[in-house]
Image (spheres, rainbow, N blue to C red):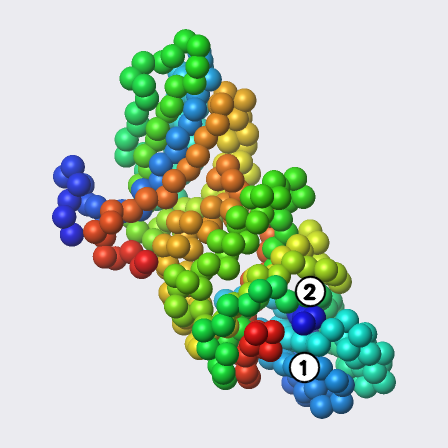
Amino acid sequence: MIRVTSFVHLRRDASPQALDDVVAIVRRAADEIDALSLQVAPTLPPAHRGGQLMILAAFRDLDQYEAALRHSFVASALRPALDACADRVETVRYEQGAVCLQQPDLTNGVQRTLLVHVHPTADPAEVVKWERALADMARYIHTIRNSSVSRVDEVDNPSGQPWTHVWEQEFETLDGLTGAYMKHAYHWAWVDRWFDPQQPIHIVDTTLVHAMCDLDRSILSLAG
Amino acid sequence: LRRQNGKDARMIHVLDELAVRPGVLAEVRARVRDVYEPMVAPLGMRLAQSWIAPAVELLDGPTDLLLLWECADTAAYWRAKNTAARDPAAAAFWASVEPLLAGRSRRIMVDPDDESVLR
């Protein structure tokens, strides 16, 4: 499954209506183009570098994704709408990594996306250990209902160094992310070591995108 | 919660294990005392204890310098860690001692009976 996740950063002079307009057009696009899923929602606080809007898309394969890019609605409506109000649209495309599903039928939840850049000098074996430790978070932190670690294939307009990985989780509520996820010892005493520049094993750049939005229905379950 | 050695066990402990090259133990200790300790103290991270192992500085091999830091709780640990992570002075400190070390590790520890820790 091919995933495309975008973060829309509105221009400072964008009208207050701009956000709603883009949301409406993306929702119309979901009806027009052929995609497994196309969801859009405002970025929720306490996001960091996540812009004002998140667009979450899933495609069966690259052919379906490229057909969507060529679709007349994208050219005639979606792109112009974004160009009219967005300062920057940051997008990552990736093949969905292995998914861990605890609640594939999750609806009206919260989706969190973390974009990170792993230093190119990192030992590949250490990178695999870190990826495994991230994936294992769902085994310890039960508010993570569904999750996936993916390696990024393409980045447009990155706000940091080119992102190498996407770590996604789906929660029932925002509290599952801001509460148990942040407070669990497996997070801060174990996984965070790879993120902490004071740790000799750290491999992840300190600049990252940490963003969350409302989720109509589980998107990760489409890869299950 | 029981107390360990008369101290509140409801603490997050950070253990730095520095394998110090022969002949520079005093220099590393001085840099910790003069540079790192005052840098992290305002962040709520306090040096609780230090040891060397073995109990004598070896002439021909690394001597471990163990530094035990403490933070009040999980939130305090996140604050100290995130602030130091963004501070170029912290990175500069570690870069400055790196040539004096044969290796190092940092472990994050809690009392197994501390029920305030979510796990």
**Residue on which disc 1 sits:** A36
Look at the numbered disc 2 and give the secondary structure of its residue: strand
Question: Which of these two is toward me, B61 or A115?
Answer: B61
Residue at (28, 31) in percent of width and height: B49
Find residue B51 and report its horizontal and vertical position in percent: 30, 25
Chain name for mark 1: A
**A156, above or below B53, in the image:** below
Q: Residue placed farthest to the front in the image?
A: A224
For residue B68, say whether it is visible: yes
Amino acid type of disc 1? Answer: Leu
Residues beneath discs 2 and 1 located on the same chain: yes
**B82, above or below B88, in the image:** below
In-image side of A90 versus A188 (left or right): right
Give the quadrant of the C terminus of chain A.
Answer: bottom right
**B110, above or below A25, in the image:** above
Q: Quadrant of residue A138?
A: bottom left
Find residue A17 and report its horizontal and vertical position in percent: 67, 85
